[in-house]
Image (cartoon, rainbow, N blue to C red):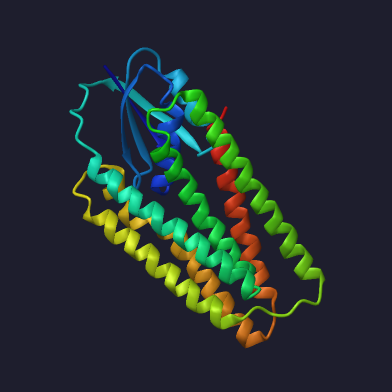
Amino acid sequence: MNKTTFIIKDMDCPSEEQMIRMKLESLNQVKHLEFDIPARRLEAFHLEEVQPIHDAISQLNLNDQLEGTSKAELPIRTDDSHQRKILWWVLVINFGFFVIEMLTGWISRSMGLVADSLDMLADSIVYALSLFAVGASISHKKKVAKISGYFQMGLALIGFSEVFRRFLSKSEAPIFQWMIIISVLALMGNLVSLWLINKAKSKEAHMQASAIFTSNDIIVNGGVILAGVLVYWLESKLPDLIVGGIVFGFVMRGALRILSLSR
């Protein structure tokens, strides 16, 4: 049995882990994967050559690097049913806040909230692909990934166009109170997700990366809260549009990564 270590610099939360797992699932020589997200490290236990594994990971564009290969024993697998339950709860929380932020974002005219909702949707899609596709064929999983990726990309493009339209038009500034209140609630949702993941008694990535798991979403939540404060202070819609445009960029990047699973 061979153990190959990869350094994956852009692997900063469990959603990237799920993408890598799905990408490598079709390779018969891969027998076990161990993730260390804080260290951006993946250890792949496999037979035969490592190059097909490296090529598959590289297609995800996560800034990967092959560190080395050595002989090793296959680790004993543990039951992951508890972690799957945690994933279900995290999926429900992310999708729930996607719906809440999308509705309140349009009502309050906040592109920051709308963009943050799509960021929540991006995480939901990755977890749903992992959970719902259990037992399905590889071709079916790739088809689902392609549909999800194009759907998310379409939403991001609509968001970009709406930001541009509002920038050129004389639309009113968003309702800053809603921006701040809903973003604070979304932040609390992310903290609940973090607490749930910490409850998982496991050495897998979801436990090890608990501190990193919500980092990106917390930054986005903080950005929308700051934009709400600036909207009030400056009496301008520009802070909201700037934050919305930045987050839509994150959503587009996520869509491209999901599409890479369908190759």
222 relative to 148 in the view: left or right: left
Location of residue 68 in the rendering, given as x and y in whole percent from the top left corner? 36, 26
Location of residue 39 in the rendering, given as x and y in whole percent from the top left corner? 34, 45
The quadrant of the image that shows the C terminus is top right
Relative to residue 74, is residue 178 depicted above or below?
below
Q: How many marks?
A: 0
**Residue 10 visible within the image:** no
Q: Nearer the viewer, residue 147 or 259?
A: 147
**Residue 86 visible within the image:** yes
251 relative to 23 in the view: left or right: right
Q: Please tell me in which quadrant of the rendered image residue 233 appears.
A: bottom right
Location of residue 138 in the rendering, given as x and y in whole percent from the top left corner? 47, 24
215 relative to 139 in the view: left or right: left
- Residue shown at 62% from the left, 76% from the top: 108
- Residue shown at 44% from the left, 74% from the top: 184
Location of residue 149 in the rendering, given as x and y in whole percent from the top left corner? 59, 41
88 relative to 51 in the view: left or right: left
Q: Please tell me in which quadrant of the rendered image residue 236 appears.
A: bottom right
- Residue shown at 48% from the left, 78% from the top: 181
